[in-house]
Image (spheres, helix red, strand yellow):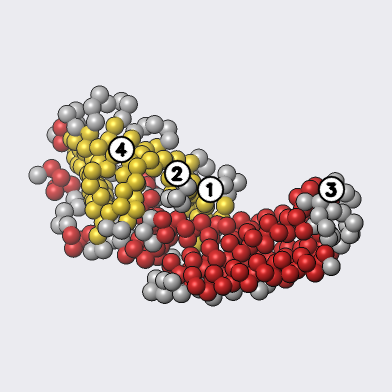
Amino acid sequence: MIHLNSILLLALLFLSCQSNTEKAATALPNDSAETELTCMQSVLKKDGKWGSARNHMCEKISLSETIQVYVDSLTQLNYSGCPEKFATAFRAHIKSWREMIPVTDAFPGLRGEMHDVFKEIENSDNASEFKNKLNRVWDTWYVVEALHKDAEMFAAIGGPDRWAKLKTLYIKAVHEEPRFDTSYISEIWRAVDHFKIRIEQQSKEFHNLGVFSEAGGWINYVHKDSARKLSSASLEGWKRDHSQNVYVVLNRLAKSENYEVGIDSLGRLEYRMEGEKICAFGLDSLYRPAEYFTPNPDGTENASDFKIWKNTNGFVHTAGGGPKDGSFSYETEIWAPSEKPFDELYTFPFNLDSLIK
């Protein structure tokens, strides 16, 4: 009777959640990204309820029976509206739970809260095999969690469709650096979808103007009345920095379905493409990417904090922050996105002659 009551409890939870899901899934039929997120949230909400019941069910029935009841309930989940990646990941997670049962069958008499039972098995002769199976449960869960957080993050900053359409961005910001006595103004005109940048920085102490593209890079030190062309190595450095610019990365991720997302050892949301690490984000309580990490060729990381947020034309973006090492800080005055190509908006010449006229 205890086993039957436990099954009925989960069945009731399932029916309750299913009713809520059907209402939520039809709430936003015209926005696929929001519908997908709603579906993921519904699936995870059900799993949360069933997981809470599961954790205490094995106080009265065996761990194997508990897992079987939990798995049977999870197999009834409806992924209609969820991204296929998410549905596939969650099915793999269910499979990992099912694969634990042959190991837990050896402990029919253990009772207690589930995690306490886990600890007892981890101290048994079956510890090695059990830990391998349990690690698989956690590994598959991290994939599910990462896909959900990825969707939450893009929803929090305006949605992937909006970011995918971004082509050009102009930013004007006030910068502070410890080495300077006064602040300076930085203006950046950036092609988000390819490598083309114009930068102008001015203060009472200096005035620099630079242009960078596949054709080359030039910097005019206006206050010194001198200019130089970048070496190939320096230009490659600028190209790498551009590719790691947070807005360029968000645009790239929003346009692609080929990236892999996971949870790294520090709990950060990590993105890879073709096995190569692109970046990692630390999300705040609103799922905004408040911390940003990018890899260097030498294995170190660049790390930034985004502390101020604004909404511009539906884009929720950072408007203040700086590197974690304190080398500079900024506060944005103008953040002007456009879906138009860079060359359609601006006619800046990209050569040395144009800088020294």
Q: Nearer the viewer, residue 5 or 145?
A: 5
Q: Is residue 259 visible?
A: yes
In the rendering, which numbered label is found on residue 291? 2
Q: Could you classify mark 3 by the number of other residues whose Cα lies within 10 Å: few (under 14), some (14-19), or many (20 or more)?
A: few
Q: CA distance from mark 1 to mark 2?
A: 9 Å
- Residue 115 appears left or right of 352: right
Of callouts 1 and 4, which one flags the residue occurring earlier in the amino acid sequence?
1
Of callouts 2 and 3, which one flags the residue occurring earlier in the amino acid sequence?
3
Q: CA distance from mark 1 to mark 4?
A: 24 Å
What amino acid is at disc 2? Answer: Glu
Circle 4 sits on which residue? 330
Q: CA distance from mark 4 to mark 3?
A: 53 Å
What amino acid is at disc 3? Answer: Glu
Whether tag 1 and tag 2 are in contact, CB under 8 A, the answer is yes
Q: CA distance from mark 1 to mark 3?
A: 31 Å
- Residue 104 appears left or right of 287: right
Above or below — where is 21 with respect to 326? below
Residue at image x 25%, y 41%? 173
Circle 1 sits on which residue? 268
What amino acid is at disc 1? Answer: Arg
SS type, badge 3:
helix
SS type, badge 4:
strand
Of the two numbered discs 2 and 3 in the rendering, the one whose residue sits closer to the viewer: 3
Q: Quadrant of residue 229?
A: top left
Q: Position of residue 230 (x, y in %)?
A: 28, 44
Of callouts 4 and 3, which one flags the residue occurring earlier in the amino acid sequence?
3
What amino acid is at disc 4? Answer: Tyr
Circle 3 sits on which residue? 120
Q: Nearer the viewer, residue 252 or 240?
A: 252
Q: Position of residue 214 (x, y in %)?
A: 29, 55
Of the two numbered discs 1 and 3 in the rendering, the one whose residue sits closer to the viewer: 3
